[in-house]
Amino acid sequence: MNNPLIELRNVSFTAQGNRIVEGVSLKFAEGTATALAGPSGGGKSTVLKLAAGILVPDRGEVRYRGQNIAAFTWGQNLDFRKETAVVFQDSALWANQTLYQTLELPLSIHYPLMSGKEREQRIREVVSEVGYRRDLMVRPALLSIGEQKLIGFARAMLCRPAVLFLDEWTESLDDEAGGRLVSLARRFKSEGNTLIFISHDFDLVSNLSDCVIMINGGKVSANVSREELIRNTKVAGIIEEGMNE
Ligand SMILES: Nc1ncnc2c1ncn2[C@@H]1O[C@H](COP(=O)(O)OP(=O)(O)OP(=O)(O)O)[C@@H](O)[C@H]1O
Ligand SMILES: [Mg+2]
């Protein structure tokens, strides 16, 4: 991979004295889908947040389009935030804001010239795409975990990102709602965008990803292409087992 869109170079991350991610080097190519898989507590969410610039590594660097994101100017950081979006494992909606306010914020930051009416139109559009049909003028505590996931996904799609980071985005959803969010992710990728996702669902991982990266004990334990996963049943077995350890 010559010019990766995102690259982690020897990245480590420590929290409360514990080394959670150690010496991880990874490349994500533009227009591809990469799955991060592995056992619970292995460090997947932490690696995803490091790649998305949500967490700052204490060693190594994360590069976006060849530039260290820690050295971004204010303007570059704003562009990076507009081009990338994250669906967090716990949805991470604003507890003390209505859903509407939560959804309006990214639009008012990234499209400051948009009128209130245009913002409302875009919000209604993404909310309908994810299949959320209830009131937007409520706080997230009134929503089920699955409904929070829908709003988290809608928020990520609002500003039409080029890179989506999805952390177990179909968890807690029924088949219909989960299927819809998988289709939206698939469509996003088919439009030439870049997807980096975490899932414990082996079928989803093998269907949607071009490449699977196993994270275990805060390190990369395997990096397997989709072709290899399909062709080599032994490798597929090891990956499937490793996802459920
Ligand atoms: N801020 C933090 N402070 C202390 N420990 C943390 C912190 N963040 C993560 N950890 C620990 O680091 C390890 C990896 O966490 P992480 O959330 O990245 O795992 P994961 O692979 O996403 O797991 P899961 O599949 O359960 O979501 C866990 O043991 C977790 O408790
Ligand atoms: Mg996680």
Image: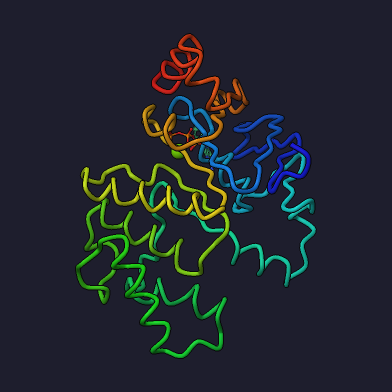
Give the residue displayed 44% in from the left and 51% down from the top.
88
Outermost residue, top side: 234
Q: Is residue 40 above or below residue 122?
A: above
Give the residue displayed 45% in from the left and 25% down from the top.
39
Q: Is residue 154 above or below residue 208?
A: below
Give the residue displayed 45% in from the left and 11% down from the top.
233
Measuring from the top left, give residue 38's x and y in whole percent: 48, 26
User: Which sits in the foreground, 43 or 107?
Assistant: 107
Measuring from the top left, give residue 17's x and y in whole percent: 63, 35
Q: Quadrant of residue 104?
A: bottom left
User: Which sits in the foreground, 148 or 2?
Assistant: 2
Give the residue displayed 40% in from the left and 42% down from the top.
168
The quadrant the C terminus occupies is top left
User: Which sits in the foreground, 12 or 74?
Assistant: 74
Measuring from the top left, give residue 118's x and y in whole percent: 42, 86
Q: Quadrant of residue 113?
A: bottom right
Across the whole image, how many numbered discs are drawn on residues? 0
Q: Quadrant of residue 202?
A: top left
39 sits to left or right of 49: left
> What colour scheme was applied to this rendering of the protein?
rainbow
Q: Is residue 178 above or below residue 96?
A: above
